[in-house]
Amino acid sequence: MSNAVDVLLLTTPRAPHLSPASVQVSENSAPPLGLLCVAAALEQAGFSVAVVDFYQNGHKPRDVVELIDVLRPRIVGISALTSGIHMAYRLCRHVKAAAPHVHTVVGGPHGTALPEEVLSHPEVDFVVRGEGEQTMVELTRVLFSRDKSKAGLFFVSGISFRNRNGNVSTQDRAPMDFDSAPLPARHLVPMANYLQQGAIVSSRGCTYRCWFCSSVTFNTHKYRYRSNDLVMQEMDLLRERYGTRSFEFIEDTFTCMPDRILSLTGLLRSRDYEWSCQATIPDLNEHPALLPSMVEAGCRGLFFGIESGNDEVLKKIKHMSRKKILGTIDRARTQGVKHFVTSFIIGHPWDTREAIADTLDLILELRARGAHTPVSILVPFPGSPIAKWPEKFGITIHSVDWADYYYNRALISTSNLCREELDEIYFSVIESVVATAGTADAVGEMSRSRLGGEVVTN
Amino acid sequence: MNTAEVPVRLTHTWKRQGDTVVLFSDAHFNLVRLEFNQIGGRVWELVDGKRTVEEIVDQIHSVHPRAHRPDIEASVVAFLEELRGEWLVMTTGDLAAYE
């Protein structure tokens, strides 16, 4: 029996600094749902597909050679974030060295934001910009067609490629009707390997316009969502197939359309599911019925992108205030939400040492309430407003080495703080945060010293 | 770890604080604070992705000339192996596997 497939889809390998244990925590162990949606669309169109999660499995770039040998795909598609784009290039180089006739396609946020840069790497044949489902189906049809000229490429929206006259970018593809997209082809990956088997995406797009976020370049501002019946079907299916009763809605803004959520929670009340989602403080404040309804329907975990603890900065981000943040968290705790993740950013254009001291103060207040509080230094991801117009925000970007685009290193200076100061402040903030580790055992942050005789005990 | 190998630091978040070096590792996703004493901290600082283990041992030996060099070498190698086990350093050879 032949193992051959038409299309092989891959995530990018983990960067060296991430250990195997980094994917053995639930926050970092979800199946690659975006890639599985593309796989489902290809399968629906009649193509055979394999998906290999290099990131989760710990594969190295050169492992793709063996896959090519066994699976003999005609197309290899790779989904890449900015921090993983260098790994995508390495994968493509191995593919081309082993099988020059195989077409290489790079999709995901980085290629969407910077298609010309991705195409400057000769090992990449095509960039898929934006949502990949329909684009990959149409691209695959053209590449599989008998027309040697491949003139059909010009009619595939949302791709960039090279031809003899230079680079070609076809028109952007309009955001798809999410309801008509097939469910992720989870059967193509070993679901038992993932801790977040109940990861689910019920909507795409974001209505907020955060200056540091690149998500809208990929998912757009147009908010689209699956019908609640379909969401319930998917959750029931996950329970039936994988036995999970615990779900995580992994999307930009789960709560931004309160009527949809109130209706969904009405359906969820008849199930014994527990779930978590990303919410915003304004949504929960402006729609008081939302939170109790969510809790009654099994919501036990909330993720908030709080970003700052300074009222002036908060006002500029999401019309929030410290008072509203703490009030909302307290209300949610009282009503039965058990787990909170509140994320923060240091290095906003208006951040000063004093503003960041406010941020640390809020972080500590939230930790005292049991919240997990990841902190990052602002990363100017391609596609974000801050990367597109740094001068407008008084930002200087010091590095475009994408392998450095990781949350714990300063890549920018602001008008108030230079790069070195941001690094130094970040260090002192996380030192203060980890010093409270005793209050956060449940989230795993800890202080330890056990490196033999060379280590001073704390 | 072979003394001809070149170790590379994997975390950027570290700082000298007086006689010690404090660093934070998120290699395992959770944030971990580590503190190295004077010699451990000096070894950490010398791990710059350019020096070999042997050169690091030479540097430490030059500061402690009365110590037995083979003992220093054994300690430095053991320490670096421990750091490698904690995913805090790799060798350039380890990194080549990611190419």
Image (cartoon, coloured by chain):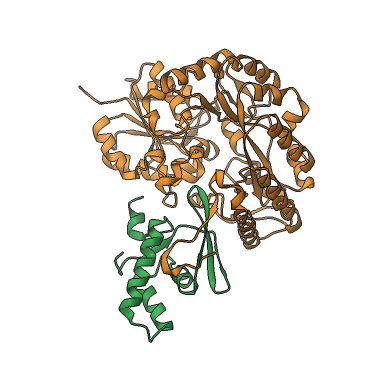
Chain colours: A orange, B green
Between B31 and A6, the residue placed more toward the observer is B31
Between A373 and A80, the residue placed more toward the observer is A373
The reply to whether residue A407 is in sight is yes
Between A304 and A104, the residue placed more toward the observer is A304
Between A315 and A390, the residue placed more toward the observer is A315
Quadrant hosting residue A256: top right
**Above or below, A365 relative to A130:** below
The reply to whether residue A96 is in sight is no
Query: How many numbered markers are drawn?
Result: 0
Q: Position of residue A144 (x, y in %)?
A: 34, 22
Quadrant hosting residue A103: top left
Give me the residue at 48% from left, 29% from top. Answer: A34
Q: Position of residue A246 (x, y in %)?
A: 52, 27
**Above or below, A399 relative to B71:** above
Give me the residue at 57% from left, 12% from top. Answer: A229
**Above or below, A203 relative to B42:** above
Q: Position of residue A1 (x, y in %)?
A: 20, 22
Q: Is residue A212 left or right of residue A89?
A: right
Q: Is residue A434 left or right of residue B96?
A: right
Q: Position of residue A147 (x, y in %)?
A: 34, 21
Q: Quadrant of the C terminus of chain A?
A: bottom right
Residue that sits furthest to the left in the current view = A1
Residue that sits furthest to the bottom in the current view = B66
